[in-house]
Image (cartoon, coloured by chain):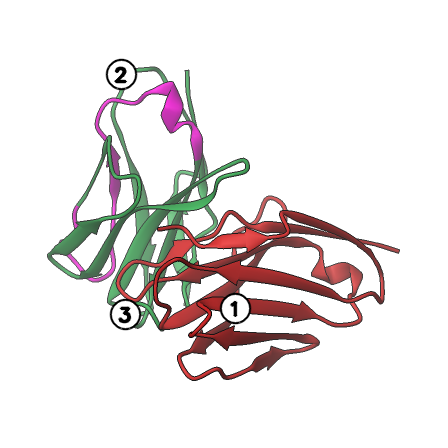
Chain colours: A red, B green
Amino acid sequence: QQPVQSPQAVILREGEDAVINCSSSKALYSVHWYRQKHGEAPVFLMILLKGGEQKGHEKISASFNEKKQQSSLYLTASQLSYSGTYFCGTGAQKLVFGQGTRLTINP
Amino acid sequence: NAGVTQTPKFQVLKTGQSMTLQCAQDMNHEYMSWYRQDPGMGLRLIHYSVGAGITDQGEVPNGYNVSRSTTEDFPLRLLSAAPSQTSVYFCASSRRQGAGEQFFGPGTRLTVL
C-alpha cells in the first residue's frame, strides 16, 4: 500500500524552511527519502530505521515515529538546489513510494 | 563502476508490439526492481527480484514479465504494448532489500502509439 505524502506541492523563497510528511496505514520498519530533479532519476537522501532516530544530510534532516507510522523530512534554510520532487518509500520486502511532493524554491 | 545502466533511453512502439527494456548493474547487488513513473502518480513498483532466479510482483505487474538469470541483469518485457504503458521506466538496485539505499538507472522513456 502506497504511503501518503503531504503536502503535494510547496513553493518557498530561498532561505525558508519546509516540512514534508509521509504516513502509512501499515506498520513501518524503515522509511526511505529520495529527491528527483526534473528529467533525472531519483537520488537517495537517507534511510530511517525503526527506533525513532533522526538523520541528517546537509541541511536536510528527517524523523521517524514508528508508533504513529509517520516520517517527516525537514529542509532548513532552503537553497535553490533543493528544488525537485521528494519521495518517501516504505516496505521491507517491496519498496513502495508515495506520490511525491514537488518543492519549488524561488530566489 | 557504471552503476545501473538502462537501454534504450527512448523507444516508440505501436500497440501490440512487444519489446524488452534492459537493465544491468555492476555493483553485485542482490536486490533489483522496476518502477514506472507517470505524472502525478509517483513511482509505482512493477516487479522486483531479491536474487538470481527469484522474482515477485509489485503494485502494477499486469502486462509485464521479468526474469533474473544473473545477478547483473534484470530485463523487463512488455508482452503486447498498450497506450496505457506509455511511461518512464526506472530500474533500481540495492545491496539489501528494504533497508538498502536504492541506486536508480537513468530511465527509459517509452511511448506506445
In the rendered view, tell whether residue B107 sits above or below residue A17. above
Q: Amino acid at mark 2?
A: Gly
**Residue at point 49% right, 67% down?**
A70
Residue found farthest to the front: A68
Q: Which tag is nearer the camera, tag 3 or tag 2?
A: 2
Query: Which chain does tag 1 point to?
Result: A
* Disc 3 secondary structure class: loop
Instruction: Note whether B49 is above or below B81 in the view shown.
Output: below
From the image, tell me which residue sits under label 2.
B16
Q: Which residue is mark 3?
A: B28
Residue A75 lies in the magenta-colored region:
no
Pointer 2: residues within 10 angstroms few (<14), some, or many (20+)?
some
Left of B51 or right of it: where is A70? right
B2 to B22, vertically: above or below: below
Closer to the N terminus: mark 3 or mark 2? 2
On residue A102, the disc is none
Q: CA distance from mark 2 to mark 1?
A: 42 Å
Foreground of the two, A61 or B9: A61
Could you tell me if residue B68 is visible in this image?
no
Q: Amino acid at mark 3?
A: Asn
Q: Report the front residue among B21 and A36.
A: A36
**Amino acid carrying mark 1 in the image:** Ser
Q: Which residues are magenta?
A: B67-87
Count residues near mark 3 (Cα–Cα under 10 Å), then give few for <14, some for 14-19, many for 20+.
few
Please state the horizontal and vertical placement of residue A66, each as a whole percent of the image. Answer: 43, 74
Q: Position of residue A28 (x, y in %)?
A: 37, 68
Foreground: disc 1 or disc 3:
1
- The verdict on a common chain for dots 3 and 2 is yes
